[in-house]
Structure formats: structure tokens, C-alpha cells
Amino acid sequence: MVIEKRHSITLDEIIAYEFRCKKPTCGTRITVIAAKGVDIPDRCPQCGYQWHESTAEAVAASNSLRQFLEAVPEMERLKQFLGCELYLLLRSPQESQDDVLNKKG
């Protein structure tokens, strides 16, 4: 017998977004309620580490992140018009992406 766990969520299960400072000595977390819109801070409120740089790549990354976060509630609102439902598959820390994608079911 094979026992398998799949971790997945639907868009309506997303209640907040968490931003975590990448500065090794900080790690401060900020939680933003998903229904209230998206406001990504420019700097860490604890240590001041810059979260948005002005390089073309950093601007593109920030814009893509903002578009993604704004699309989640819009997709939830419009899901009634789709003939399918979207599930986001999550991997556990001990699984690789390939492990998750190769599971049947």
C-alpha cells in the first residue's frame, strides 16, 4: 500500500502575504492581509534594509510580484466563470519540486 500526502490550497484559502527581510542578521516578517490590497514596503521597518533596488531586474521583479499579488483576489472573484478550479500545489521541506509533480492523483 502506498500512502501519499499532497499539500494544496485554493485561492480563497490565501488570507495574507508575509514578507521577510533577507538581511542575514534581521529576518523581520511583515504580514499583509490579502483582502486589503498590496503594499510592499520599500525597506525593512526593523533594520532599514532596502527591499526594492533600482536596477532593471529588481524593478521587473517588484512589478511582477505586485501583479501576482493583485491578481489573486481578482481570480478568486472571477472563478465562477471558469470551468475548472485552480489549486496551488505545495511541497513539504523534504520534497523536491520533481517529487511533487511526479505524484499521481
Image (spheres, helix red, strand yellow):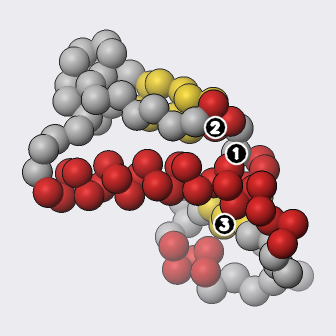
In the displayed structure, does residue 32 sit left or right of residue 22? right
Above or below — where is 19 with respect to 88?
A: above
In the displayed structure, does residue 79 sit left or right of residue 41? right
Judged from the image, the secondary structure of the residue bearing numbered disc 3 is strand
Judged from the image, the secondary structure of the residue bearing numbered disc 1 is loop
Amino acid type of disc 2?
A: Ala
Write down the residue under mark 2: 34
Say if mark 2 contacts mark 1, CB within 8 Å.
Answer: yes
Write down the residue under mark 1: 14
> Residue 11 versus residue 91: which sits nearer the camera?
11
Write down the residue under mark 3: 89
In percent of width and height, residue 4 lies at 78, 72
In percent of width and height, residue 85 lies at 81, 72
Disc 2 crowd rating (10 Å Cα; few below 14, some 14-19, many 20+) is some
Give the residue at x 45% y 32%: 39
Amino acid type of disc 1?
A: Ile
